[in-house]
Image (spheres, rainbow, N blue to C red):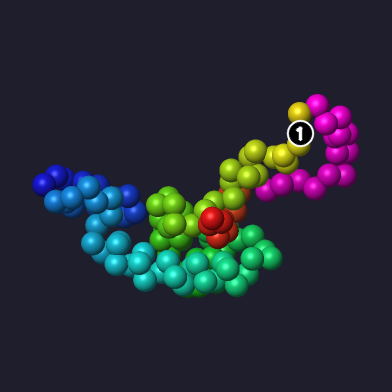
Amino acid sequence: MALVVCKNCRRAFISAQDEELCSECTTRLNELYPVVRNFLRNHEEKLYTAHDVARILGIDVKDVEGLVTLGLIDSGATQKQAGPRRPPNSGEAKKGPKAKKESSMYVYHKKRT
């Protein structure tokens, strides 16, 4: 048995196994995961922030962020930071000043496998 801090709510709890979440958060996130996943799958054409998803579904933004932290929902931040994929030495010209600016906010979407 060990004293562990919940990754979602930051409350301490006693864990007999290597659990990362307290029982309350585990139950809540297990109920919310299919709802959030189905919402994102049904709205693939648009990217949403965690705040957008929480506001639309009427849930706590910490729970949406918890699903991302646990890896249940993929964050599009890695794709945005990596930039477009080009072959080395492609000689492709850089985009001019009219290029669309990307938001610095992390955008969340469904996990692609």
In which quadrant is the C terminus drawn?
A: bottom right
Residue for badge 1 = 87
Determine the image quadrant of residue 81. Answer: top right
Left or right: 6 as drawn, with respect to 86? left
Left or right, 72 with respect to 95, comes to: left
Residue 50 appears at what percent x and percent y? 53, 58
Q: Would residue 76 be found to the left or right of residue 96 on screen?
A: left
Q: Is the magenta region chiefly helix, strand or loop?
A: loop
Q: Which residue is drawn at 44% across and 57% down?
A: 72
Is 67 a magenta residue? no
Horizontal placement of 65 versus 5: left or right?
A: right
Residue type, label 1: Pro
Q: Which residue lies furthest to the top in this view?
A: 89
Q: Residue drawn at (30%, 62%), measured in percent from left and top?
A: 26
- Residue stretch in magenta: 89-104
User: Which residue is rendered at x = 55% and y = 60% of the image?
Assistant: 110
Quick one: 48 or 20, which is closer to the camera?
Answer: 20
Which residue sits at x=40%, y=52%?
70
- Rendering coords of residue 54 (x, y %): 50, 66
Give the x, y percent position of residue 111. Answer: 53, 57
Mark 1 surroundings: few (<14), some (14-19) or many (≥20) residues within 10 A: few
Is residue 65 among what the camera can see? no
Front-lying residue, 39 or 51: 39
Number of on-image labels: 1
111 or 39, which lies in front? Answer: 111
